[in-house]
Image: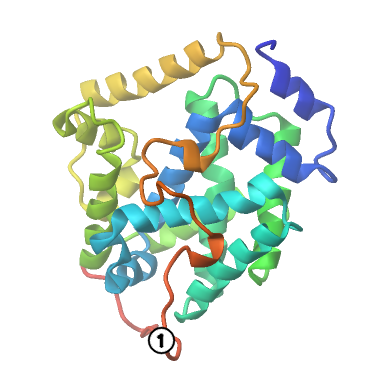
Amino acid sequence: MRRDHWRRVNAALDPERDFVEIYRNLVMHEFPWDMNQSLSFALFRTYAVPGIGRLLDQTGEFTSRAQKRYDDTALLLETPTRLGFGDPEARAAIRRVNQMHRAYDIPDHEFRYVLSTFVVVPARWMEAYGKRPFSPAEVEASVRYYRELGRHMGIPDVPETYDGFATLMDGYESEHFAFDEGARRAADATLALMLTFRPRVPARVMEPFSRALMDDALLDAFRYRKPSRVVVAAARGGVRLRGRLAGLMPARAKATQVADLPWIRSYPDGYRVEDLGTFPSGCPVHRDEAERPSA
């Protein structure tokens, strides 16, 4: 297959009508590694919002069961991409996500912010590190995909354009990023898990490499030590080189699914989406809106 096969396939599709197919081609064929990395970083940066990171710490899911929580999140979010929103399994996956969220008093503005990271972070990652940036039609398809996901999750006032998502994300982070001890614990546990994804590379190498891909605002929010300029240049240059080399390879004919990734380890014998995630009981957990993040 020609190197530009999936770019040409997506160019022939209509992002208004075929946004799921276009997005699926990006995730499972054209950029499977890049999309996995960028979406992982998108979720990770949401922990720097104290309300989000603190709640994740309080549930204990990311600090005591990080592998399962990571796997369940990836598998549930991939299902609508792989099958389309109308598929019964995709509906079951979204229903599971909604059931988990309804157990907590999560404000709509946090949902909108998390959704914005899924749109903006991958697009910026491709600009910086991918074998090519998203085309305008692929950006539009991503926007429409996450607007549809937001509709299924009942999230109001979701932005209508990429610029709207970018403005929301940047403004929200500028206003809300702050240090919180619980959020730091959730971040540390998640980062420790990610360091196991490349077992042949020592953690003492991967840990500063991972921090080198974080921006200053994220590092400051977690109070992570900033890597040296040499480490930052080496890490980011290495990822850029990987993208250029990927652009020389033939297009992938076989789709890459989350369950095929070696770091998804919780379900060696398969899974049902209805069984993924957590099953909180009782009334929704209310959070004190007046609580301030730690100084």
> At 34% from the left edge and 34% from the top edge, which residue is drawn?
213
Q: Is residue 125 visible?
A: no
> How is the structure coloured here?
rainbow
- State whether residue 75 is above or below residue 179: above
Q: Nearer the viewer, residue 248 or 111?
A: 248
Q: In which quarter of the image is residue 90?
A: bottom right
Circle 1 is placed at which residue position? 286
- State whether residue 212 is above or below residue 146: above
The kind of secondary structure element at disc 1 is loop
In which quadrant will I find the N terminus? Answer: top right
Residue 81 image position (x, y, % from top left) = 65, 47
Residue 248 image position (x, y, % from top left) = 56, 8
Q: Residue type at mark 1?
A: His
> At 42% from the left edge and 90% from the top edge, which residue is drawn?
282
Question: Mark 1, residues whose alpha carbon is within 10 Å: few (<14), some, or many (≥20)?
Answer: few
> At 56% from the left edge and 57% from the top edge, which residue is drawn?
115
- State whether residue 195 is above or below residue 280: above
Q: Which residue lies furthest to the left in this view?
A: 204
Q: Quadrant of residue 240?
A: top left
Left or right? Give the position of 89 relative to 97. Answer: right
